[in-house]
Image (tube, rainbow, N blue to C red):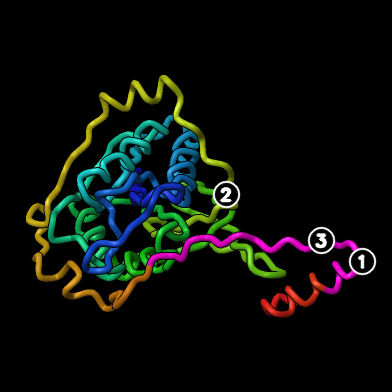
Amino acid sequence: MNIVVCVKYVPDATADRQFESDNTVDRVGVDGLLSELDEYAVEQSLQIKEKREGEDITVTALCVGPEKAVDAVRKALQMGADKGVHVVDDAIAGSDAVATSLVLAKAIEKLGPVDLVVNGMASTDSGMSVVPAMLAERLELPQVTLASVVETQGDQVRIKRDNEGSTEVIGATLPIVLSVTDQTGEARYPSFKGIMAAKKKPLETFSLADLGVDAAQVGLSVAWSQVEETAARPPRTAGEIVTDEDGSGATALVEFLAGKKFI
């Protein structure tokens, strides 16, 4: 069984995140990491392999992004993925979900017959949650999305999807595109053994030309949506201190909350 897990390199939420001059997110000049929500996708891919001990299963981590995005692939390899693929090309910068899904689909097709494509529920930097569905359309595969529990047996996959006040049980036959939520279980931390082993695992690099993708099909110029303007967040102001010496503190608090439309 061939499993491809799509991972994304995102700016570290604790870093000083910035925008480029064209109003796209700076993914080069800021510290980044493997998207936390994609860690759950890696974890579920590895669990599927571990639960089917004795079968020939390969887990490949696939990432599209700038040079530094290879760190996201390395993290997946350290967690236990068998192989890594990094698609890097200057023309990709500024791509939206439509173009990203195109590049991912072409890379998956190049990797040969794939039984399962696993995604996180969304990326932590944009949170659109549409790439899995777009991938399914481009690969002409069924999609089973937003799984909180994943079970496999043979070529059958069954998931549980938690909705507000209810749970759905959905079954599908491989090959499929799957996305998992952060309710599937905590992702493992790379062990020292895993970190050392990752250094010897194969890691391929593809360009758009390698995938047969025309540079005119990706990038900011063909994006369906663009950010027109950005503004820096205003500096934090000093808080207001209310001294309750005459019993008016409660009134002052209510007036403050009402003025901010919190109540």
Specify whether 261 is left or right of 218. Answer: right
Residue 246 numbered mark, or none: 1
Q: Do residues under tags 1 and 2 come within 8 Å of each other at their CB atoms?
A: no
Give the amino acid type for the residue marked by disc 3 in the picture: Thr
User: Where's residue 67, x and y in %?
Assistant: 20, 45
Residue 231 sits above or below residue 202 on the image:
below
Would you call the spot at circle 1 few (<14 residues within 10 Å), some (14-19), or many (20 or more)? few
Q: Can residue 6 be seen in this view?
A: no
Residue 184 numbered mark, or none: 2
Residue named by callout 3: 243
Of callouts 1 and 2, the N-terminal one: 2
Q: Distance between the residues labelled 1 and 2?
A: 53 Å
Of callouts 2 and 3, the N-terminal one: 2
Front position in the image: 178 or 84 = 84
Q: Distance between the residues labelled 1 and 3?
A: 9 Å
Specify whether 181 is left or right of 19. Answer: right
- The quadrant in which residue 99 appears is bottom left
User: Where's residue 190, x and y in %?
Assistant: 45, 29
User: Where's residue 174, x and y in %?
Assistant: 40, 56
Residue at point 39% right, 59% down? 176
Magenta region: which residues? 232-251
Front position in the image: 12 or 172 = 12
Residue furthest front as drawn:
245
Front position in the image: 44 or 223 = 223
Residue 225 numbered mark, or none: none
Residue at point 73% right, 74% down? 256
Residue at point 49% right, 32% down? 189
Front position in the image: 2 or 103 = 103
Q: What element carries label 2?
A: loop
Would you call the spot at circle 3 few (<14 residues within 10 Å), some (14-19), or many (20 or more)? few
